[in-house]
Image (spheres, rainbow, N blue to C red):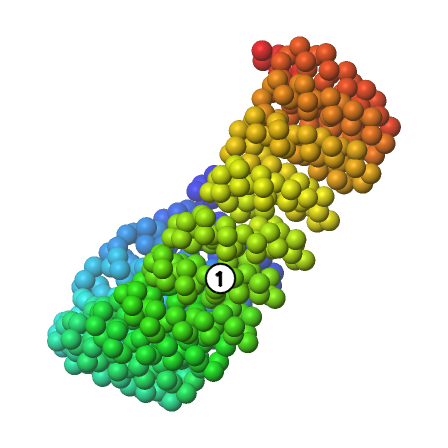
Amino acid sequence: MSMVDEPLYPIAVLIDELKNDDIQLRLNSIRRLNTIARALGEERTRKELIPFLSENNDDDDEVLLAMAEELGVFIPYVGGVEYASVLLPPLETLCTVEETCVRDKAVESLCRIGSQMRENDLVDWFIPLVKRLAAGEWFTARVSACGLFHIAYPSASEMLKTELRSIYSQLCQDDMPMVRRAAATNLGKFAATVEPPNLKADIMSMFEDLTQDDQDSVRLLAVEGCAALGKLLESQDCVAHILPVIVNFSQDKSWRVRYMVANQLYELCEAVGPEPTRTDLVPAYVRLLRDNEAEVRIAAAGKVTKFCRILNPELAIQHILPCVKELSSDSSQHVRSALASVIMGMAPVLGKDATIEQLLPIFLSLLKDEFPDVRLNIISKLDQVNQVIGIDLLSQSLLPAIVELAEDRHWRVRLAIIEYIPLLASQLGVGFFDDKLGALCMQWLQDKVYSIRDAAANNLKRLAEEFGPEWAMQHIIPQVLDMTNNPHYLYRMTILRAISLLAPVMGSEITCSKLLPVVVTASKDRVPNIKFNVAKVLQSLIHIVDQSVVEKTIRPCLVELAEDPDVDVRYYANQALQSIDSVMMSS
């Protein structure tokens, strides 16, 4: 490669391209840094390339982002871990830029480099960098500093550790909300590296400051800190320090904070343990389920099954179920949808009797909801209920609603029902299926929406697999073949699709006697779309039927189609003929 032969060339090109007005050229050269570094060698990379990058004052965020990313994996190109510190200056500069994604990538790269650096290098180079950023005049530097403490802290001496904790404490009380937000976000990571005595003394006081912040954007990030700190503290400290904060947050004046608590409550329960969960967090959760903001109720409703799993069934029935009943008729369709997506999971938790008495009426009301997503979410999880209450009761109570939904005006609901049919069929058994659902499956083949017709064809194949070819020969094939003369060509195309899917399941004999003649007849159709679909179906049948049938029936039909006036019909017919020839060659 010429770059290796002429070591001066790459750096000249790089400098030219980095100063080029075309952003794409500048980006390309940044993304080729590793190639250039290899060409230059480790020493020249340290002495020429890295200083050049440190002085590079490109103002385009995309270029800076690429540079921050590249430098994170640059240790091998500067001579290994012992020279890792030379990469810090350019990244330190990037930590102070205004664009958030550039700063975040620079912090990520610094963390990656710092985690590989030797301990004495961390003390000599990395910790001073963190201190400089934390004392930065512009808030961007202080924001970036918050993400580096967990890397710097473990290697520091006792005196330095005290200083770092003190600096972090100041960042938690910074004048700029953005800095306090960064401090709240990274507190869990930093706390994980702090010794237990200092964790209780220093970190908890920082945490308390953040939980009382006047900005809701800081308080809501402190909610995440609750779960992280809860895992680090002993259970009695957790109950003493974290639990009151969670309970207060669940009543916070800002709905965003309450939303965050609703989202995190399951993790918070794990942190404080079972007893405080029952006494303190159940009332807090009930408050969130009845919150006056729909967003909070959505978040709380989405966690209802997870929360019930922590409690015993009696507590769930006593406290949570009344709220679930209220939510099932909530004024917000999104709340009902969130509830519908998880409520089925409550059946195994509550047991058979409570499910039949309490949950089934709620399922039925949600199945009849006016909003299609609510109905969809219930349909897709029906199997969880079946495991608890058994198929007899399920079919008595829910099947009428399912049959109703099979003709729903929203095609996505009809589609969800079709996809659920094979599972329902295997659970109901063949006799029950024929009585109740057989006619529906045929009806869908003539739906106005293509996705439904296609899913219906797939559904027939899955039913034939479930109940076997003999059943399909009696209940599916005759009705499918009756539809081949439908006046509308789109429905005739669906039948061809169904035949191509059923043929492999039905086997060679039935395909030759029943299905192939229908396909050959369809090759005389007046609509070109039907004819080229015939060619495709015949191509798929080549591997199913005997070679003699291919030569006697399929090939003549394709030869005729290959002379059709329509270009697409000719194309697919020739494709199928080529397939026959290749099968002949291989056999």
Give the side of residue 315 with respect to residue 411, left or right: left
The one nearer the camera, 362 or 258, is 362
Q: What residue type is labelled 1?
A: Phe
Residue 506 appears anywhere in the view? yes
Image position, residue 13 (x, y; %): 52, 53
Pinpoint residue 309: horizontal percent, then vertical percent.
31, 62
Q: Nearer the viewer, residue 278 or 365?
A: 365
Q: What element carries label 1?
A: helix
What residue is drawn where x is 57% and y is 65%?
A: 369
Vertical position of residue 294 compared to residue 354: above or below: below
- Look at mark 1 in the image and give the residue it sits on: 363
Residue 62 appears left or right of 223: right
User: Which is more toward the observer, 4 or 267?
Assistant: 267
- All told, the count of numbered labels is 1
Return the x and y of residue 564 as percentages of the image width and height: 84, 25
Q: Give left or right: position of 168 versus 137.
A: left
Name above or below for residue 246 compared with residue 25: below
Q: Which residue is drawn at 20% across and 77% down?
A: 239
Is 137 in front, or is 287?
A: 287
Residue 227 lies, with reference to residue 471, above or below; the image says below
Tell me the quarter of the picture where residue 512 sits.
top right
Q: Which residue is drawn at 39% across and 67% down?
A: 304
Q: How crowded is mark 1: few (under 14 residues within 10 Å), some or many (20 or more)?
A: many
On screen, residue 11 versus residue 284, left or right, reads right
Q: Does the rendering let one see residue 414?
A: no
- Where, by quadrant of the figure, is residue 50 drawn? bottom left
Q: Position of residue 491 (x, y in %)?
A: 75, 40
Q: Residue at x 58, y 39 (%)?
A: 434
Vertical arrangement, residue 385 with respect to residue 368, above or below: above
Q: In which quarter of the image is residue 244?
A: bottom left
